[in-house]
Image (cartoon, coloured by chain):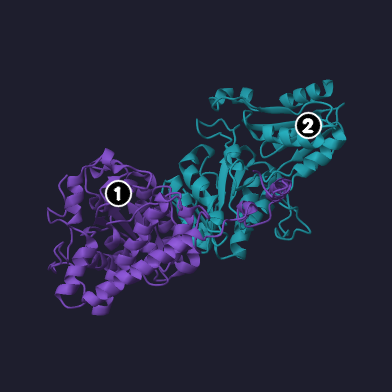
Chain colours: A cyan, B purple
Amino acid sequence: MTAMTMAKALNTGLRRAMEQDSKVILFGEDIGRLGGVFRITDGLQKDFGEHRVMDAPLAESGIVGAAVGLAMRGYRPVVEIQFDGFVYPAFDQIVSQVAKMHRRTEGTVRMPIVIRIPYGGGIGAVEHHSESPEAYFAHTAGLRVLTPGDPQAAFVTIQQAIACDDPVVYFEPKRRYWDKGEVDEGLDAQDLQRVPDPWRARVVQAGDDVTVACYGPMVRTCLEAARASSDVSLEVIDLQSLSPLDIETLVASVERTGRLVVVHEASANIGLGAEIAARVTERCFYSLEAPVLRVTGFDIPYPASRLEEHFLPDLDRVLDAVDRAMAY
Amino acid sequence: MSDAIRAGAAIQLLSPEGERVFDTRYDITLGDAELRDLYRDMVLVRRIDTEATALQRQGELGLWASSLGQEAAQVGSARCLRSGDFAFPTYRDHGVTWSRGIKPLEILAMFRGVTNGGWDPIERGCAIYTIVIGNQALHAAGYAMGIQLDGSDDAVIAYFGDGATDEGDVNEAFVFGSVFNAPVVFFCQNNQWAISQPREHRSRAPIHARAAGFGFPGVLVDGNDILAVMAVTREALERARAGGGPTLIEAYTYRMAAHTTSDDPTRYRGAEELEIWRLRDPIERLKVFLARHGIADRHYFDQVDHEADELAVHVRDGVRSMVEPEATSMFDHVYAEPHALLEEQRRQLREYEASFVSGGPA
């Protein structure tokens, strides 16, 4: 095991994927010489060459549209969108082409494209640099959506996303890039006997009273809440795959605890929390002791950074929801 | 904006009257059999188009986008491709798909509504039709980048219309093609109309002139002259193969029919310009040329007409007898890898439909 940041774990995972398959190519703005604005691709162009780590023109639709063509030619493009708020110019290509191509061509053209997007707030950034647009993509048939909760998950799931024959929108919790964790670099990401299926949720903290479902940047927040909660025992589940959603793991937990709190940075309205609440309620109607509660960002555009601590769910807001669930 | 044909600004090797024209920059020499084939292809493509329009009117197709009048631009350019090359057509490029060996019923299946595609793009070297305007130009640029990575001398041709040049994707494709020096030919059929909007709504500059701003050659060609279209496309493809990067070809042509069968062009354009363009018909001028030079005779023309009639019957019968897709096939191929939610929904739909005694809702 090696202690490393999530940023380093992603970098190491990308390197591993490129070593294992010469068709894996990286494409994005400033990812080559600079190594990306977050340095996730640091050193990869130097080691793999300009033909495999390509600096792209400043055009997000172009990056994703060109990736479609590269995939048709047999490549496995891993593209980087520099920030969450810059993905929208590419939305058309992602929704109309990347997501639908395999179906439109009746399975003859695969789209093994990974679209990496640093997302979420908490870093004091200017506008358009702190958004959580994952629900748009999770809503779109044909896409898969992954987000890692810690460095080990990042190391493994980035490789699994690249190996997947479906397009994967891969959301990286940017404020957790510099969090350290133990990573087993000896793990073979494809060895499902030893590493978890990327499409399954992970119970990251076992508990008895309230199930707390979260993902990405909120995993650490919820683990901290679980540690801080002395009299109520929290079971923390890292969803990891936002599409498909692993409802089975949630159901198994909620059938024991009878209570569910869903936590995400994205706004509540028509968000992942709503879908999770609906599906868990369908399955666990007679087990639930309280309604499914949500702790989320408010239904406003992401606020100016001086206000973000009031916007983002934190330990106290999670525990407040836990208390409300227990009070039913 | 002046008419590029009347102004003599477009490359032309065959006049609307069927006379060979001398051009200082471009020329082409084709054998008699090849010339006859070009005529045959255009006639057959037009016949498919006519038949498809009729089938839509009879309720057999949901929609049809007519290629009438654009046969030379489509057949001429696509005929220049090799088997390893790749074409990215729009939904109007039936002459392109025909030339890539896509069968008429494969083309019509999407318009009938039995599929969203119709053929295997990889096997055929031709993408399925792209309906979102301009998306495919970027796919072409990316595919061409892949060719470069492979070290191959294959080439790509991206089709789009004058309207698509408004789109960001087409302009981004020009940037990507230029920056990576990708082996891609951008083939714009300027058919004068983007549904109801005339070409004056595009840009102050002629379309082909934009290429200069992106740093690659732009060529204006008489899109109803199949010889000129072939000459400029061949040159552009050769340049792409040799590492010379992209070319923008503006094929000046005319959409003789409505935008689609849902459109009513009498609301926005007059009969006069239709008359002007009828005199520039791409098939007629080649026919006159072939006859005048003794390359084809009445017997040959009759034979092609007969073949077209038979093709029309084949298309009509084939469309009507297309197998209706199974309801649960809508879940097929949404994902390449297993997906539990969709399997659950597939099962739900199957069980729901089986719950009706008659086998389905009344």
Give the left or right position of residue B153, taking residue B200 as reference: right
User: Mark 1: which secondary structure?
Assistant: loop
Residue A212: give its label: none
Label 1: few (<14), some or many (≥20) within 10 Å? many
Considering the image in quadrants, where does the N terminus of chain B appear?
top left
The subunit carrying tag 2 is A
Residues beneath discs 1 and 2 located on the same chain? no
**Where the C terminus of chain B falls, by quadrant?**
top right
Amino acid of disc 1: Asp
Residue A252 visible in the snapshot:
yes
Q: Which residue is mark 1?
A: B162
Marks 1 and 2: which is nearer the front? Answer: 1
From the viewer's side, name the closer residue of A7 and A86: A86
Q: Residue at x 23, y 62 (%)?
A: B282
Depth check: B39 or B7 in front?
Answer: B39
Residue A60 appears left or right of A202: left
x and y, in percent, of residue A229 in the image: 82, 28
Residue A220 visible in the current orientation: no
What is the crowding at mark 2: few (fewer than 14 residues within 10 Å), some, or many (at least 20)? Answer: many
Residue at 20 percent of width and 78 percent of height: B295
The amino acid type of the residue labelled 2 equals Leu
Measuring 38% from the left and 64% from the top, which residue is drawn there?
B312
**Corner quadrant of residue B84:** bottom left
Q: Which mark is residue A260?
A: 2
| 3D distance between C-alphas at marks 1 and 2 | 55 Å
Q: Is residue B27 above or below residue A45?
A: below
Question: Residue B281 falls in which quadrant of the image?
Answer: bottom left
Residue A261, picture quadrant: top right
Residue B65 in picture, x, y percent from top left: 37, 52
